Amino acid sequence: MNYRELSTPVLTVDLDTVERNLDSMATLCGRDGIQLRPHTKTHKTPEVGRMQLDRGAIGVTVAKVGEAEVFAGAGFDDIFVAYPIFGAEKLRRLAHLACDHNILVSLDSAAAAEELSRAASAQEATIGVLVEFDSGTQRCGLVPGPACVELAGKIEKMAGLKFRGLMTFFGNVWGNAEERHAETRTAADKVGAALEAFRAARMPVEIVSGGSTPSAAFTNGIAGVTEIRPGTYAYCDLNTYYQGVCGLEDCAARVVTTVISTAVPGRAIIDAGSKTFSSDLLSSGPKSGYGYIVEAPDVPIIKLNEEHGYLDITKSARKFEVGEVLTVIPNHVCVCVNMHDTVVTLRQGNVVGSWRVAARGRVC
Amino acid sequence: MNYRELSTPVLTVDLDTVERNLDSMATLCGRDGIQLRPHTKTHKTPEVGRMQLDRGAIGVTVAKVGEAEVFAGAGFDDIFVAYPIFGAEKLRRLAHLACDHNILVSLDSAAAAEELSRAASAQEATIGVLVEFDSGTQRCGLVPGPACVELAGKIEKMAGLKFRGLMTFFGNVWGNAEERHAETRTAADKVGAALEAFRAARMPVEIVSGGSTPSAAFTNGIAGVTEIRPGTYAYCDLNTYYQGVCGLEDCAARVVTTVISTAVPGRAIIDAGSKTFSSDLLSSGPKSGYGYIVEAPDVPIIKLNEEHGYLDITKSARKFEVGEVLTVIPNHVCVCVNMHDTVVTLRQGNVVGSWRVAARGRVC
């Protein structure tokens, strides 16, 4: 079946493109001598995680315990929960996983470490801990320096925990190439400051985990970083395209949608809205519009309601007709995938199968 | 169990508030002599739809066939699919439902009507049709006037279809009270123009379906409108609050979340991001921020990532600590509900049960 015959709206993923994207990142990391622990936030799908392991990834990264459970249930042994988990019920589940899986957790407070220790020791589990420091994103993470050493020292004394190193998110390494170059220097200084404090305290740091898709080609050269956790590279999207990280042909995930109304002059309305794309704005490039219409690149999607996408066709010579099928590259593929229970897999435009987005919606 | 003991992030709904909201709209419509066919897009939950029918609603409204299937499966007989459905597979399913349910569909093109007719007659079903006209939203809908009569005339001749009237969305009746007053006059003119064309053609119009939550108190007075389809009123949200349609105490749906990091100066980070709230911006009032923190109304949520909410605490005297629980009223409750498989029901802060959001994610 050709993808144009699918019931719409539907999210499709081209397998040839996914494989090429996974190969490229594996090659880059191999060349740079850095380990790859891909973040599954983009695909949320064990099938893709398996393809990443098959290409040399050392494990997978998730954000939430529910996601870790999905990947553990699918046979993954090494899971990094790159998130400071807090709350007794979630920590109990996490400690349970750690009884027979290699679980790593990142955190930035003694309070979170104490709760994690309590949960781990109650089940006689051992959980590896990375101390998170802030390399410029200003989200989570301690100031790189003595504060990290102090927390690591506390963790080393806590039952059920094993301090294994440092984690940071290179979320600031973003934008055009020049901006990413400048922010890479900032990030490198922060990594250096963190490692210097541990050297001064004569405390070994086994892992330094960094990364993100737009930063990968830049930050792999930062001294001391042992691994990266990019996610988006698996599918790519309009944000990564406008950052110059990929071409449009590398955007593997596309929403197939149908024009359902052309009654209002200057408008064509498609059956995909914020429940299909998410309402994430474009954060790179023109920073406007809700996706790239492959069949009509000059036509912007100017607005979304839950089930409606508004195409501004006033400046287009193309005619739009009710019932015609269009293909849209989403702004931000991670949140788009999270809207879908299933993605349909394609090769050369033909349907070859489907994947359940098994870790979709696991916020707890 | 108190709601503060729940594993976070979680979406809760206060039942006393929901009941009061449903009672209020039923009373308003009763007073105005207008029928109520609530849109289920807000709750996506048969349990709430049942509460609406129990208070006199004449049926429910959905946007997609998959949603109609969920409500039909839960025992609902009268379902209005307020959306121009296009595509053979979906239309086959819709016609199947119409074999033993009262199904209404709105559309604005002969192309959509022809496809619907083909599907209905293939299963010897009859589907009621409302012709959609545009009353100012500029989304779907014909220009009110002869074009509507012409399409209705075509529908009357099509097998399996029964023309039953007109539908419009008062999405333009929005904003502050003054703006809503002005837009109500626009909408009233459009309704008048549509009905005048049918009168001139001596063609009876049984149903004129309008509505939305912010417009309800205004447009119920428009001559000729027989029913409205508000949705948001069931739960209310920060948008309806800033439009003066409800008080904060009427916002029944709240996200319970935990502070997971305070390491970065001036920031507190909560475990709820765009995967919990959606990334919909506030479209009324200050038009900034991603939700209202009940315990700290002066602290804005300035940014969301998928799993992180960024609180700007620089101007707050309040201290935030890792592990503390906060309660957030979302900007736009419909899209927030769509992020959750389950909502937890409360009375007076205590958990009394949970609902599966059975129609969540049904985009097809």
Image: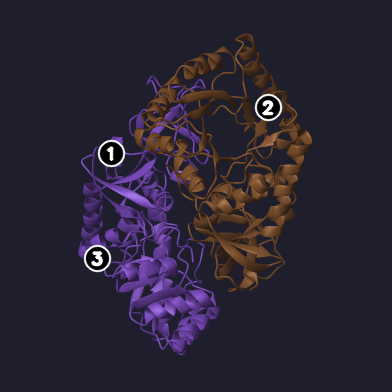
Chain colours: A brown, B purple
Q: Position of residue B48 (x, y in %)?
A: 28, 58
For the image, the number of numbered tags is: 3
Q: Which mark is residue B3?
A: 1
Which numbered disc flags the more N-terminal residue, 1 or 3?
Answer: 1
Q: Which mark is residue A44?
A: none
Q: In the image shown, does B231 or B267 lie closer to the viewer?
A: B267
Q: Decide: few, some or many residues near mark 3? Use Cα within 10 Å; few <14, some 14-19, many ≥20.
A: some
Q: Residue under label 3, please give it.
A: B53
> Is any atom of residue B146 visible in this view?
yes
Mark 2 and 1 residues: CB-CB less than 8 Å, in contact?
no
Furthest residue to the right?
A31
Q: CA distance from mark 1 to mark 3?
A: 28 Å
Which amino acid lies under the numbered mark 1 shown in the image of this protein?
Tyr
Asked if residue A314 lies left or right of residue B187, the reply is right
Q: CA distance from mark 3 to mark 2?
A: 60 Å
Q: Tell me where residue A262 sits by quadrant.
A: bottom right
Q: Residue under label 2, please give it.
A: A225
Which amino acid lies under the numbered mark 2 shown in the image of this protein?
Val
